[in-house]
Amino acid sequence: EEVDNAEICKMENVREKLIFKIDSRMEEETHSIQEAVRSLGSLNQELKNKLIRLEKVRSKVSLDEPKIKEIVEGNPQRPRLELLLEWAIESQDYYQK
């Protein structure tokens, strides 16, 4: 009611125009949010697929190779593979929900 009595609303069709513009912007924002949610869902599925492939490859790798051993055990610049996988899976699970 306070808005309806505002000076600007006494001008011809201003109230209706404002309502229309607000409604249009709300629809645009809703659409943008829906697109972002779809995009995040897609990215989450992509991450899940990569984790599944990584699990399959990991089971076929020989842990006796020096390069693989360094990746698995980690080094001062890189955490152990187990931790990296754990973080990736936790992140994927978090965003899946």
Image: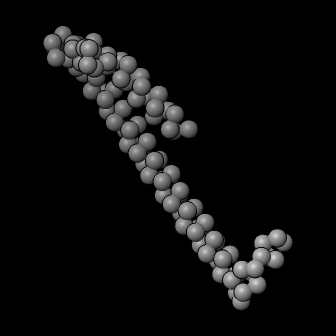
- Where does the C terminus fall, quadrant-wise? top right
- 18, 31: nearer the viewer: 18
Task: Looking at this view, name the residue that lies furthest to the left.
Answer: 66
The image shows residue 42 at horizontal and vertical percentages of 42, 48
Quick check: 81 left or right of 31? left
- 67, 59: nearer the viewer: 67
Quick check: 9 left or right of 91? right
Above or below: residue 13 compared with residue 88: below
What's the colour scheme?
A: one colour
At horizontal 18% and vertical 10% (from top left) the residue drawn is: 64
The image shows residue 36 at horizontal and vertical percentages of 48, 54
Location of residue 72 by image quarter: top left
At horizontal 68% and vertical 75% (from top left) the residue drawn is: 19
- 4, 49: nearer the viewer: 4
Task: Looking at this view, name the residue that lies furthest to the front.
Answer: 7
The image shows residue 17 at horizontal and vertical percentages of 65, 81
- 80, 51: nearer the viewer: 80
Residue 72 showing in the rendered view: no
Quick check: 96 left or right of 8? left
Location of residue 51 by image quarter: top left
Task: Looking at this view, name the residue that lies furthest to the bottom.
Answer: 12
Above or below: residue 4 compared with residue 39: below
At horizontal 82% and vertical 70% (from top left) the residue drawn is: 2
The image shows residue 69 at horizontal and vertical percentages of 21, 13
- Where does the N terminus fall, quadrant-wise? bottom right
